[in-house]
Image (cartoon, rainbow, N blue to C red):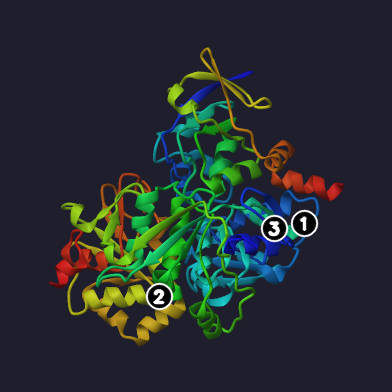
Amino acid sequence: MRMTISEKIIASAAGLEKVSAGEIHTVNVDRLMSNDGTTHLAIDMYNTLLKKPRIADKDKLVFIIDHNMPADNPKTAAAHKKMRDFAREHGIAFYEGKGVCHQIMMEEYVRSGELIFGADSHTCTYGALGAFGTGVGNTDFLYAMVTGKSWVLVPPTLRFHLTGKFREGVYPRDLILTIIGDIGADGATYKVMEFTGEGAKAMNINERMVLANMAVEAGAKTGIFEPDEAALEYLENHGRKPKYLFKSDPDAVFEKEYNYDLSKIEPVVARPDNVDDVVSVDEVGDVKINQGFIGSCNSGRIEELRTAASILKGKKIADGVRLLISPASNTVYLQALQEGLMDIFIDAGAMIMNSNCSVCWGGCQGVIGEGEVLISTGTRNFKGRAGHKDSKVYLASAATVAASALAGKIVRADRVIA
Amino acid sequence: MEKSKVWKFNHNVDTDQIIPSQYLLLPTIEEMKAYTFEPLIKDFAKQVQPGDVIIAGENFGCGSSREQAPRVLKELGVRAVIAGSFARIFFRNAINIGLPAIICKEAYDKVKQDDVVELDMSEGLLKIGDETLTCTRLPEYMQTILNAGGLIEFLNKEEVE
């Protein structure tokens, strides 16, 4: 067959035996997600621009309010109300205040082998389960909502072979930042990043999400893993079955192959204002911080909260530093509560936020002021991403963020523990 | 060929620069457009004139999938965005809303801010001074969407036929 996982998903969604990179095909979309970042505009377009407004299959749609949740001003509240009312009127699955959209999608909907469009760039997260998730704008979303279909340009695949094991204090977050630093912010534009090898197989689904989630930061259409026992177990634990269990064929065509030995990965940070400006934490120099953030669709799950708690336990964050923690979903929040992690965070002086996008997108809560420095487990460090246009964002692992909050400056976690 | 004033941007212009997050939930594009390029250029929205073009380096429109980014540019009358390369979602969004996104590898090095260039979109030609550059053609499918005026117009046309 000579196809990659991604080509097999697109072929099945297009009803074809075989597809190849570079072809454009019409596909049936298995599921469509939209959040409060753009849904109010899609609804306006639905109501005013369409000749025949209709919904192809309401059961494929999911609306999630997570970006500015809870609403911070009347205009935001109006956008949310529009979304809430439309969902109710049309019987669309609707979530608000339950968590970050991609975390909810992973917990409730995503199945291996599905082709999913989300009106959010980090829809590529779903590749952790071997689904083809990709971000689209609200016009693409609307077209697919009305017709049930869309078009895709079949992307070529870059394959990343992961070998070895992370050393103590090094995390998937360090790996994906390292990879993006190596290949650049447009190193995978229009392509798929497929992760494979023993290092990939050893990761649980939450850890795989950390990698797949940031594929878009290298420009990729999606990031994907071969669904295996870990994927099946995750699906079973969440009451679902896979749609397809596709693997890349041994003779599938990959545009380029990369090798990463996980034992050689160091704790790293991405410096402002580019996700691909990545250096070892030891090389970052003396960088004082004003705020730390642990959360987001990249790194707000139980693994990251446990890591942060292990570093913060019994300690106090530095004077003048704010530490914000937002679990990726209420499910994660409850688990952290049960494990006593929230007590540790509050004792350390952190603020616990509701499950939402929070500072990662800089639209409402926790924004930083002029000249301030944030160290974050979020997805992006663009100029002004977390608030004032002249503020700075460093991206790092939860361990590095927690340690830096204790030190008041960017440090490696093992330096603080020592 | 029509003449257009150039707004020159660097490489890796992300969609947070085009329209920052805090304005995305405003009710309309009309209301959002005042904040276009706010982190980069003071009063861009007041200075830009209908018919102007943006010329940028590589990876224009990277980051968030916010369709507000191409839409505020279109709302302000930007005639086309010409870049060495585009991030995937911005590129697709721009064509979907009927904003020409044109790949021209050489343009970035040959223009400066406020230059006047001539753009012939039907032929894919960009004239800078005495030199005429040939831009990359869109895939036929995307050109059909753009010619229809965007994906919604394309859909409405499909419904009639």
Q: Report the front residue among B107 and B4.
A: B107
Q: Badge 2 is on which residue?
A: A202
| For residue B82, side relative to residue A313 (left or right) | right
Q: Badge 1 is on which residue?
A: A53
Q: Which mark is residue A228?
A: none
Q: Are marks 2 and 3 on the same chain?
A: yes
In the structure shown, which secondary structural element does the residue marked by tag 2 occupy?
Answer: loop
Tell me if label 1 and label 3 are in contact, CB under 8 Å. Answer: no
Residue A382, given in percent of the width and then of the height, sits at 38, 48
| Identity of the residue drawn at 27% across and 77% down | A309
User: What's the amino acid at mark 3?
Assistant: Ala
Q: Nearer the viewer, mark 1 or mark 3?
A: 3
- Within 10 angstroms of label 1, few (less than 14), some, or many (20 or more) residues? some
Tell me if label 1 and label 2 are in contact, CB under 8 Å. Answer: no
Residue at the farthest left position? A418
| Identity of the residue drawn at 48% across and 63% down | A71
Q: Report the front residue among A154 and B25.
A: A154
| For residue B137, side relative to residue A368 (left or right) | right
